[in-house]
Image (cartoon, grey):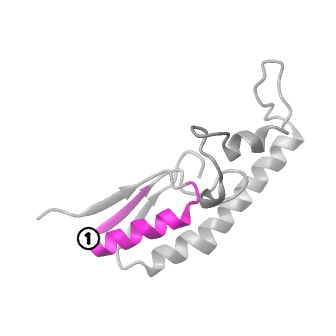
Amino acid sequence: MGVRVLFSSDLHGNDDHLARLLRRAEHEGCDVVILGGDLGPRGAGYGRDAGLDGVNGPSVNASALEHLPKLASGKIDWDTDEALVYMREGYESQREWFTTILVPMLDKCRVPSVCLFCNSD
């Protein structure tokens, strides 16, 4: 018999979904959980609090970016103090989620895990 793997990505800070995945991994007798990228929250709020997804209405990311200065092209000017503050707040939100939610949840799970941090993590 081969290795039983549960793989997921793009949690975006949704700890309710993470909890369901970990319960499923334990229930199914998985050998490893692999979480691949975009694990932490983006901008304001954790994934479970993030509101609409952009398909069913405006996403938090879109509304959270409205206050940032724009270039003549309409794109965000990431070389501004306002953009730097927004990015720092996002990094702090991710740090908090990783240390207070993700790591403790993975520690409690009986199935070993591997996290592949990439994209916005």
Whether residue 38 sits left or right of residue 23 in the image: it is right
Please give the name of the residue rendered at 54% of the width and 69% of the height, measured from the top-left corner: 102
Callout 1, which amino acid?
Glu
**Residue farthest along the right direction in this orientation:** 81
97 inside magenta stretch: no
Please give the name of the residue rendered at 60% of the width and 66% of the height, measured from the top-left corner: 98
Are there few (<14), some (14-19), or many (20+) residues within 10 Å of tag 1?
few
Residue 34 horizontal/vertical position (percent): 38, 60
> Where are the magenta residues, as a range?
12-35
Q: Which structural element holds mark 1?
A: helix
Residue 97 horizontal/vertical position (percent): 63, 66
Residue 46 lies, with reference to residue 100, above or below; the image says above
Please give the name of the residue rendered at 11% of the width and 65% of the height, measured from the top-left corner: 1
**Residue farthest along the front direction in this orientation:** 56
Q: How many marks?
A: 1
> Which residue in the structure is indicated by mark 1?
28
Residue 50 horizontal/vertical position (percent): 65, 54
25 inside magenta stretch: yes
Q: Quadrant of residue 113?
A: bottom left
**Residue farthest along the top direction in this orientation:** 73
Whether residue 30 sits left or right of residue 83 in the image: it is left
Residue 1 lies, with reference to residue 119, above or below; the image says below
Residue 74 horizontal/vertical position (percent): 78, 23
